[in-house]
Structures are given as C-alpha cells and as structure tokens.
Amino acid sequence: MNIEFHYYITKYLALMSGFESDEANIIAYASQYVDDNSTRYSIEKPDGTIYENYISQTYDITKPVAKLMRIYLLFHFLPGDPTSYKARRRDGKMHVLMTTPASHHAQGIFFEATKSENLYLLGIASHMLSDSVSHQNFVGTFDEVNAIKGLWQKLTPNIGHADAGYKPDIPNLLWEDPRLISEFAHIDNRERVILAAQKLYSDYVMITSNPNKWSAVKETVIDIIGDPLEEKDISRYKDQKEARIGKIRGILKEFDADEEYDPHSWFHQAVDVDVKLFNDEKFKYDPIKDKMKFKEKYEFSDWFRFQQAVRDYQRTASLKLEPILTQLEIKEW
C-alpha cells in the first residue's frame, strides 16, 4: 500500500469505526510514517545523552538494504501461510516466510498491539496488516522466489517486491504476476484494497465496539479507488493519485479531519535542528555537520511516542515470529 491507503483511507476507516478525529489522525499518521521513518538520527537529550531512533523503512523500497532485513520482515512483509492456495506458483515452490493476506501471525501481532491502547502502536500494526495484503506472495528477504523475469528486474535485487517496482502498491492497478499459476496471475489491486480495508475496519470496530457499517464503508472505498488502471497506462497513475487524495480529503472534511499529510510535522514538533549548510528540508540531514536537540517536553511529542512504539512493535513482532525465525539461517538480520 502507499500513502493513499496508509494515511487517507486508514484515517477514514478509523473515523467510521468510532475513533475521535484526533485519535484517527494519530493512527493514520503513524501508519504512513512507518514508510517515512527511514532516517537514523542522533539527537541530544536535555541531560546531554544521545537518543538514537529505530527506522521502520529504508530510503527507497526499490533499493532494499540487506543488512536491515528485520525491517522488511516485521513491518512490510510479515510471514504468513506458505500453503495458501492463492500463493500457488508455476514452479511449485513454497517459502516459510511468504507474505499472505491478514495471516494468523499478522492478526495475532495486530491484536497484541491493541492491548496497550497505544494509538501509535495501533497505527504501526495497521501498516503491517494492510501491507500483508498488498505485498502477498513476496518475502521480505533476499530470495529467488521474489524474482520476476525481465531486463529491469535483472537490475534490481530480489528482496520483497523490488522486481515488481511499485505495482503492488497502486490501488487501482491491473497487472500480471508471472510467478503464479494462471488462475491467480492476473492481479486486480482494487480487490486487495477492499480486502485490506475490510480487515482493518473490522479490527477497528472490535476495538471501539461500534456498530459494523461495512457495507456503507465498502461503497465509499470503492468510489474512492475509481476505475481500473491498465498496466500499459501506468504513466497516468500520478494524476489519478492526486485526484483520489482530493476525493478522500473531501470526505474527511465532513469529520473536520482533512489535514494534508506532512512527513516532517511530527519531527519538527519534537526536535530543534541546527543545519550548518542549508536550512532547507530539500537537503538531506548531515549527521556530521548538523546538530539536533530535543525540545522541552519531547517525551510527550508524537514523534518520540511513535519512535518508542516502533521499538515496542519490533520487540512484539520478533517474539511472535521467533518460532519461525530461529529455524532459519538468515545471514543478515
């Protein structure tokens, strides 16, 4: 999934399930920020010690980093059920780390995350659950089962859906996955978005104990996604993305929750940045030249709470998956 689902649709689902506007915003922002939390910072605390955050994504998902394999497995390609009938491949191969939609592992980690009533943790788990649908049939490690034949694919590493590029994350795309048997090779991402929305909404309703209005919610999500996009017309995606976000924000405005996503807002609320070379967000942070200090009461900031939730989530997910991971010999972890 991308920002259209992780932030905007997730916020809509949270609101419709009974969360208040400020709560829904935290859930949705945390869900999307999992993808934007790709920079490691060293930040000075008031007592002079240094705080270092965990990252939950690498800078470019089409250029994965082998030494950070835990990020892909835990946050974006959670291992599911390798025997799932929709994961059947032409070569007959199965993989114990295969991502499958809303698997029992994914649901177990999701509900473990809800026990603390931590909205930041809930947003992170929401990202994982929705990605388990869009990233199905890929594994979050370097493996040939991810390989899709072709010139471009030969230039990219076989980690996650790098070979498929951004195709799995475009909400209305129709595309082919030649690894799967013919019955399942034609992928309609609209169906996957609906499934992810249904799973997420149903789980949210279980938390809020609100009446389930999935039929009405489903119709709205279908309307948001719009008409299918053929793979040959993929260049139209950016314009369609902007139109969809505009449509969703119009719906969210009815809840007074139509804020545009700003990937820097949480960070700047918590941290003072002394940029030596350029005071401009276009220029990448330089850990040698630039200095960062936490603002007062940073412990109560959204950014810091999110970072603590990332640590909590990683710990919880690792424990849940320990029976699987301890049986494997993953060199980079």
Image (spheres, rainbow, N blue to C red):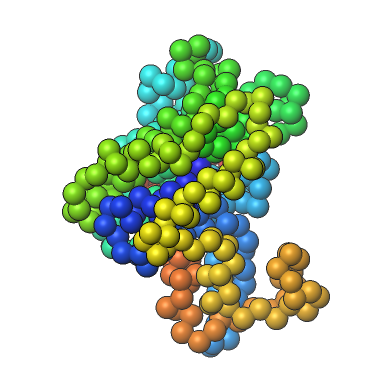
* Up-down relation of residue 195 to residue 184 (above or below): below
Q: Position of residue 258 (x, y in %)?
A: 46, 61
What residue is rendered at 56% in x and 70% in y? 265
**Residue in the foreground of this view, choosing between 212 and 150:** 212
**Residue in the foreground of this view, choosing between 69 and 210:** 210
Q: Position of residue 270 (x, y in %)?
A: 53, 77
Q: Position of residue 134 (x, y in %)?
A: 48, 36
In the rendered structure, the answer to whether residue 170 lies left or right of residue 308 reads: right
Question: From this viewpoint, is residue 179 visible?
Answer: yes
What residue is rendered at 37% in x and 67% in y? 22
Question: From this viewpoint, is residue 327 visible?
Answer: no
- Give the quadrant of residue 308: bottom left
**Residue in the foreground of this view, choosing between 36 and 317:** 36
Q: Position of residue 118 (x, y in %)?
A: 33, 64
What residue is rendered at 58% in x and 86% in y? 48
- Give the quadrant of residue 36: bottom right
